[in-house]
């Protein structure tokens, strides 16, 4: 596939088969694609690298959409898959979301411990802006984001209904923001150690998912 412009495609929403949630769908020349990941306009090279990894190294049918304010990567899917298979719609298993929240909380706590409450507050505002910009469900307000940063995702009983593109975007933006606070990427190493409280099956599922993703080059 290749890079598309906004005028080349049609973007619509379809209803999630099981939840009160809309799934973004891109249509191009009779083919349909679901959203995988979103990048800021300044992350052109990151977006292209992510897209090329999926297409060249993993053999996935993907398109890269270039818009003035962002880049987005979309993976091919049949609409009947969405109707019959919730996983095909991009819905993330709870264990993957819990793992991402544990990583987010670990970075937040490290910033607070190393740099103090003022920097931790700044980090919280940065993450709130990311979740607001990319419309993360159940993270629309500063209070909601603060809850996600502090509540134990393994004990809260309910994790956000995030799709795979939310997790990709969170890990991409968390790496970018974390690098700014720490001055290096050491915080993104030894991810497995941050997930010791996660059940072994969920931890292995997340690490396998991460390994197969271009994000595995950022989080090790």
Image (cartoon, helix red, strand yellow):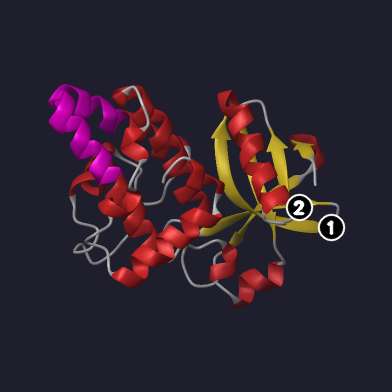
In the depicted structure, whether residue 117 falls above or below residue 97 = above
Which residue is rendered at x = 74% and y = 58% of the image?
32
Marking on residue 180: none
178 drawn magenta = no
Residues rendered magenta in the picture = 104-125
Q: Does the image show residue 94?
A: no
Of all residues, the one furthest to the bottom in this rendering is 84
Please say if the residues under marks 1 and 2 sit with CB atoms less than 8 Å apart: yes
Which residue is label 1 attached to?
30
Q: Residues within 10 Å of mark 1 (few under 14, many from 20)?
A: few
Question: What secondary structure is found at the residue carrying circle 1?
Answer: loop
Question: Picture coordinates of residue 171 (x, y %)?
Answer: 43, 43
The count of marks equals 2
Which residue is label 2 attached to?
27
Which residue is rendered at x = 21% and y = 31% of the image?
111
Question: What secondary structure is found at the residue carrying circle 2?
Answer: strand
* Residue 154 quadrant: bottom left
In the depicted structure, whether residue 190 falls above or below residue 33 = above
Question: Picture coordinates of residue 14 (x, y %)?
Answer: 62, 60
Using the numbered discs, state the Cα–Cα distance from disc 1 to disc 2 in whole angstroms.
Answer: 6 Å
* Residue 17 quadrant: bottom right
The prevailing secondary structure element of the residues shown in magenta is helix
Looking at this view, is 98 or 110 the one in front? 110
């Amino acid at each position: 596939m290749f890079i598309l412009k906004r005028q080349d495609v049609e973007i619509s929403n379809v209803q999630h088969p099981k939840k009160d949630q809309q799934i973004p769908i891109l249509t191009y020349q009779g083919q349909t694609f679901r959203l995988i990941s979103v990048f800021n306009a300044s992350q052109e090279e990151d977006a292209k690298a992510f897209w090329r990894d999926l297409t060249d190294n993993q053999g996935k049918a993907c398109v890269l959409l270039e818009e003035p304010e962002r880049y987005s990567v979309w993976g091919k899917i049949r609409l009947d898959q969405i109707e019959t298979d919730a996983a095909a719609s991009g819905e993330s298993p709870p264990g993957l979301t819990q793992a991402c929240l544990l990583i987010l909380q670990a970075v937040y706590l490290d910033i607070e411990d190393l740099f103090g409450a003022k920097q931790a507050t700044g980090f919280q505002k940065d993450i709130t802006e990311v979740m607001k910009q990319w419309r993360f469900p159940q993270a629309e307000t500063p209070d909601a984001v603060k809850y996600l940063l502090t509540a134990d995702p393994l004990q809260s009983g309910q994790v956000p209904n995030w799709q795979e593109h939310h997790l990709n975007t969170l890990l991409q933006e968390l790496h970018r923001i974390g690098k700014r606070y720490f001055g290096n990427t050491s915080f993104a190493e030894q991810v497995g150690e941050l997930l010791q409280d996660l059940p072994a099956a969920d931890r292995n599922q997340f690490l396998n998912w991460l390994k197969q993703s271009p994000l595995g080059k950022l989080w090790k």
